[in-house]
Amino acid sequence: MVSSEQKKRARNIGYGYIGLAVITLSVFSRRPGNASFKLTEGGFLLTLPARQFAFIFGIVFIGLGAAQLLRGLGKVSNIVLALAMAMFVMSFLSWATSGESFSLVGMLQDTVSRSVPITLGALAGILCERSGVINIAIEGMLLAGAFTGAVGASLTNLWIGTLVAMLTGVFLAWILAIFSIRYRVDQVIVGFAINFFALGITSFLTFRVLATNPDYNYLVPVMPISLPLLSKIPFIGQILFVQTIFVYFSFVSVALLTWALYRTRWGLRTRAAGEYPKAAGTLGVDVIKLRYRNLMAAGAIAGIGGAWWPIGTVGRFDQNITGGRGFIALAAVIFGRWHPVGAFSGALVFALAEAVRLKIGNFDTGIPSEFLQMAPYLVTLIVVAGFIGASRAPKAAGQPYDEQ
Amino acid sequence: MKDLIKSLRYTFLALVASLLVGALIIVITDIDALKTGDFGKAFSTVFAAYRNLFEGSFWGLRSISNTITATTPLLLSGLAVSVAFKAGLFNIGATGQMLAGGMVALWVGFVMTGPGWLQIPLALIAGAIGGALFGGIAGVLKARTGAHEVITTIMLNSIAGLMVLWLLATKTFQREGRPDPISKLIADEAHLPRIFGFMDGRSDLSAHFGFFVAILMTYLYWYLLKRTTLGFELRATGLNSEAAKYAGMKTKSLVVYAMLFAGGFAGLAGATEVLGTYGYASGSFAGDIGFDAIAVSLLGRSTPIGTLVSAVLFGALQAGGRSMQANTNVGVDLITVLRALIVMFVAAPLLVKAMFRVKSQVSAQEQTFRGWGG
């Protein structure tokens, strides 16, 4: 059965391909010259003639669009869509860099690294919302984790710093749990109050304590670890397996949470608590206890995500260092339809947008850099509006649970 | 009325509770006092900080003027979040809508020449329309494709921010001889009149007529919700979208209307900031107001009067906080902590009652936001 919703989506994707073709052929084919991409750290160059490249991709997009509109690509359409987006990004980059050289591997490495806090934040969101509690407080948990992680690691060592960050996340999650589960306060309100509290207290302490005690905020972050064998895979190995321990932690977390949610008894109960807590309660699941535990676990994950800033990258805490990444994580949760793998791909998309934005300012393309920096956000809008569409949240998320 | 007094009393108790916790925070973060054991000094810091907080927000004309100036954009953008909440939407995009409205108002403000009685209303209306159209994008996307407003408004905020930076560097907007993104000054006639303008020689009283615009909009919001069919339908959609649909309401258009109103309010917030507070625009004229507005709306439970009261409270804290930072060694960020605590305590009446041993029934709370919809 093909529902009208699916048909509409297939049609939208078809139009989307035609749109990509138009952009590629009309804009990206304008600039002659070669774009050089560094594919390895050593400097192996992939040189692409920007113009010819754009023509080829444009024609491929037209073909895909026609196929999608005429008969639909059926089961493979998602994979084809992902590939097409990758092709589009490539031709965008080769257009923007033509005549210069550019470290593709560096940018993608950066993307994967930047996806860590968004991924971990999104996993925290999924864990809460799958069990029926809206977690707006991801931003606050990341920020507070970053702060205590920085101070903890500066005063002791990186492991303890990460542990302290984790416990900070757990503490904030516990507050969220007490207020939303026991006192049955509106979950969005508590969550937002936690965000405000975290922003206020960390900024306040940054100026009141850290500014006068610089040794509380000074540490040497972790170094990337090359995984044996895996890091030797050409291209991919550099991007995925020469990373800090935070990145590996986020990979493992995504896999583990996916497995746990869909393959274990705990996962079934969690999803039941999020969809239909009354039924779960009737069958003997202790919904309240389950929600408490899941929230605290989520806090732990988000706290580690926060520790990524001081311990995984910059080596210090700055005021509002998370800069709204917690909300991006929330967007990733919705983008990924409350599925860990989906949220992870959302996080990668947003992280790529960030990495591209930081890189793109250096290129002279004749188009104001603000518009180039805007492109990733516009693409996200188009992807969400055209291809993803409405996503269904866990039914009970946001509703307090009565045990009766 | 009785409800109002009751809720004001709880807000007051929550305020006291927050100030107590805030005092505790000031004391335990006084590293010097902790090292020397001189807690007397720490307590006098608390006293000085809170005295400045109060004097800077309400004591004297200048403080009141500062509070009004800070309240104006908070109230307008708070309404932008509230009206969306009422329709079941979570508008994180007040910042972007403010930027859009502010830039349109700015443009009218310096392009036109004419008498103030014509130019000011035109600039304000233009700002409202600009904000409304920008907010409407998220509404249309939600209605037509189901794209979630949390994602779209966050993306639109970033887009608006970059758009403003680009505009401010164009010939039309950029001030002559300036390398940085900063706009021309608006025409003198386009300036919103200062409330205390009748007092000679008091240029330090910055409060402007934008405040009255904000009050008027609060009334409009109340009228919309309570006296119009559209408002009824918006509330019905917010409470139960499915039921509203079966009752024959066009829930999809309602989503668009809600976002148009939200954008309009936020657009006015941007417009009054540009036309009243600054007289020009920089890249960051919207600041964190769109974010604070969410707290304002949550604290006020999205009702017109609630949003008004909490905007005044937040505005007062902001004005007082600046004075506190200027005169003591307690930073203005304590305000954000206090705001969070107030929101938390107000939302949890059980906790406040336990703290102050108040005995009375607590009525069940209405939820601001019913899940993520879908």
Image (cartoon, coloured by chain):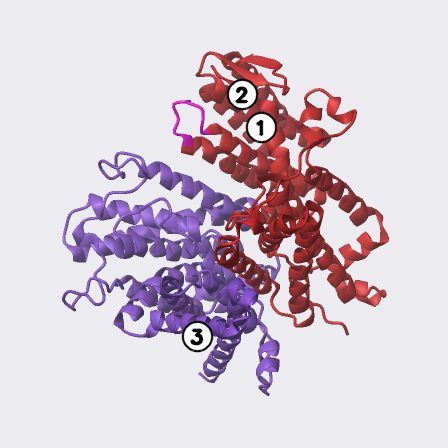
Chain colours: A red, B purple
- Mark 2 vs mark 3, CA separation in Å: 58 Å
The amino acid beneath tag 1 is Met
Q: Are marks 1 and 3 in contact (CB under 8 Å)?
A: no
Asked if labels 2 and 3 share a chain, the reply is: no
- Name the side, left or right, on which B266 lies relative to A293: left
Query: What chain does mark 2 sit on?
Result: A
- Name the side, left or right, on which B63 lies relative to B197: right
- Name the side, left or right, on which A389 lies relative to B183: right
Quarter residue A202 falls in: bottom right
Residue pictured at 51% horizontal, 15% vertical: A50
Residue pictured at 68% horizontal, 68% vertical: A178
The amino acid beneath tag 2 is Phe
| Residue identifier under label 3 | B47
Q: Are marks 1 and 2 in contact (CB under 8 Å)?
A: yes
| Residue identifier under label 2 | A102
Specify the label residue A107 is tagged with. 1
Q: Point out the stretch of residues depicted in magenta.
A: A361-369
Q: Secondary structure at mark 1?
A: helix
The 10 Å Cα crowd at callout 2, few under 14, some 14 to 19, many 20 or more, is many
Residue pictured at 26% horizontal, 62% vertical: B206
Dominant secondary structure (helix, strand or loop) of the stretch shown in magenta: loop
Q: Which percent across, then down, holds residue A94?
A: 52, 19
Of labels 1 and 2, earlier in sequence is: 2
Is residue A38 placed above or below A292 in the rendered structure?
above
The mark lying in front, picked from 2 and 3, is 3
Asked if labels 1 and 3 share a chain, the reply is: no
